Image (spheres, helix red, strand yellow):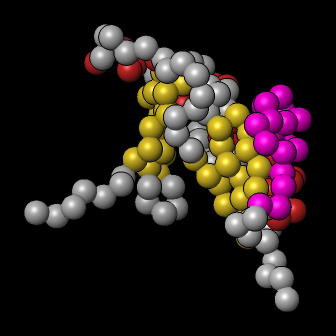
Amino acid sequence: MAHPKLDLIGIIVRNMPASLAFYRALGLEIPPEMDTEGHVEITLASGLRLAWDTHEIIRSFDSKWQPPAGSHRIAIAFLCDTPADVDATFHKLTALGHPAHKAPFDAFWGQRYAQIADPDGNVIDLFAPLPAQS
C-alpha cells in the first residue's frame, strides 16, 4: 500500500474576502471573483493545493463544528527571498491593518523570522535564511 501524500492545506475563514485579500498581499494569485465563494482552492507552483472554506461550508457537512478558541492551531510559513524581504513583507501587511504577532528578528536557528496574524487569527510565519557568518 502506498503512503498518502500531502495534497491540500485548508483554512477555515470567517470572512472570505478579507482572508483572500491577506493571502493576495503575500503574493498568491487568487482570482477576485473568488471573494463571493464559500469554497476557494488554488494550486501552488509546487503542486500543493491551498483552500479556504467559510464557517457555513464547514457546517454544511459537520453541523456540530465550532470555531476553535484560544491560540492558533496550524502554522503556515512563507519563504522570503532575503532577510530584508521578511521585514518589507511584515511592514506591508501590518500597514494593511493585519496584527503583528512577532516583529522581525534574527533567530538563533539562522533565519530572519517574523509572525503576523491573518484575518482569522492564524499566525503566519515569514522567514528567510540569514547570510552565513564567517
Q: Is residue 56 found left or right of 27 in the rendered image?
A: left
Which residues are the magenta region?
A: 91-107
Residue at (44% x, 49% y) in the render: 49
In the depicted view, which residue is nearer to us: 115 or 36? Answer: 115
Q: Residue furthest left?
A: 1
**Most distant residue in the bottom direction:** 134
Judge whether 102 appears above or below 128 on screen: above
Residue 103 in view in this figure: yes
Q: Position of residue 81 (x, y in %)?
A: 75, 67
Direction top: furthest residue: 63
Q: Quadrant of residue 39?
A: top left
Relative to 125, residue 52 above or below: above
Q: Give the percent coordinates (x, y) of residue 2.
A: 16, 64
Residue in the image at 65% along x and 54% along y:
78
Question: Residue at coordinates 67% horizontally, 49% vertically from top-left?
Answer: 125
Residue 59 falls left or right of residue 108? left
Left or right placement of residue 28 versus residue 92 in this view: left
Which is more toward the observer, 111 or 26? Answer: 111
- Residues 57 and 82: in front is 82
Position of residue 64 measured from the top left corner of the image (x, y, whole percent)? 33, 11
54 w.r.t. 75: above or below = above
Q: Quadrant of the C terminus?
A: bottom right
Quick check: 69 left or right of 63?
right
